[in-house]
Amino acid sequence: MPASPIRRLAPLAEAATRRGIRVLHLNIGQPDLETPSCMREQLALIDDKVLEYSPSNGTPQFIASLQSYYRKRVGVALDPGEIIATTGGSEAILFALMACANPGDGLVVVEPYYANYKAFATMAGLDLVPVTSRGRDGFHIPSRQVWDRQLAMHPRPRVVILCNPNNPTGTVYSRQELEMVAGICRERDLFLISDEVYREFVYDGLSVASALGLGEHEQRVIVVDSLSKRYSACGIRLGCLVTRNREVYDASSKMAQGRLSPPGLAQRIATAAQGLGDEYFDGVLEEYQRRRDILFQGLSSIPGAFLLKPEGAFYCVARLPIDDADHFAAWLLTDFQSAGRTVMVAPASGFYASQLGRQEVRIAYVLNETDLRQAVEVLREAVEAYPGRTPIEHGSISDSW
Ligand SMILES: Cc1ncc(COP(=O)(O)O)c(C=O)c1O
């Protein structure tokens, strides 16, 4: 099993904290906004004398609340028999992979990819087949030639997983990009898993197309979703798998029976979120867009740093003038501080299956405005002080990126 590149540096951060250094976390996507009060009030009301299992596929009330969410926010009508409640989006990814592929099959990922896909692929016995997206293209979907070349490298590619809006890059794929990938899946008879856990986080008035709207491809589509980011409720451990493919649904449903039940209390809390209207989502979006702007302006002004403006989610991948991001990320925690503060970033190498990303870091902007501004300044000082600093390339964006 691969170690999580996001959590791997945690012991160094703990040691820095013990030395009295304040570590500003730019490394992990744990939103800091309050979980909506209607959900917290529902939690406080729970006074069951027996904490029971719930139905394997989810309670009727929770499934109905998801149907209502998809109708209102995604514009898609779903039957209750097309949704399975899961322990976070994480379990939905695992169910989807195990339902669609056999050990030894290839899982096609656009890299840099959400690092835990590698962990899930390992659990399901699948090989990663990376299709590389480039920073200079804003990490958008690579050309058809790149897909053809990479797919030819594996004897049995079986599933493509797309994360849209994307973690780690913050890219939002257009409907055309989604259709292009769906077209490749049709030609080669592949399943398409669409990880849409950041659906709510799309900036500058852009919108994101759900794979649930890919009518003609619906039989090969599985959508993975989560309440973690949508309601700033990572600890609730609730998500879902959505598919119109009966066989995939039935296989996933049997896995759901095998693990007995998704979190029961969580579904009661989640059902309370039904009352939240557009104003809730608009407020959250405004806050994150402000943070995105602060981060983007700050990072872009660091000499030698390259990134395009992230369009969604709450991450970006930036290239820095450093020799090795793994070393840099550790050094920040072991050797650097500015007025008693340092920052923690995720080295991007763990988000690539190929040997790329050595000079890149993934940054999450889930800090409040004041901390975020501070974190960017600390990072600027750190880049200047770092012994493995590399010469700065000129031009607006690096050609080699
Ligand atoms: C892209 C992506 N997919 C899935 C998940 C899983 O989320 P959870 O299991 O909390 O629902 C995450 C969590 O960070 C994520 O970033």
Image (cartoon, helix red, strand yellow):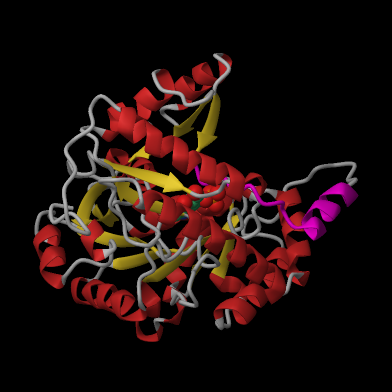
Q: Residue at x 38, y 76 (%)?
A: 219
Left or right: where 137 falls relative to 207: left
Taking the view exactly as shown, the residue that stands out farthest to the bottom is: 216
Position of residue 57 measured from the top left corner of the image (x, y, whole percent)? 62, 59
Q: Is residue 371 above or below residue 295?
A: above
Position of residue 164 measured from the top left corner of the image (x, y, whole percent)? 41, 65
Q: Residue at x 42, y 56 (%)?
A: 297
Q: Is residue 344 magenta?
A: no
Where does the magenta region start and end? 26-46
| Front residue of this view, candidates 152 and 361 | 361
* Quarter of the image where the N terminus is located: top left
Residue 393 visible? The answer is yes
Left or right: where 332 falls relative to 269: left
| Front residue of this view, candidates 286 and 170 | 286
| Front residue of this view, candidates 361 and 111 | 361
Residue 345 visible? The answer is no
Q: Is residue 241 above or below residue 373?
A: below
Position of residue 177 measured from the top left corner of the image (x, y, whole percent)? 29, 75
Q: Residue at x 61, y 57 (%)?
A: 227
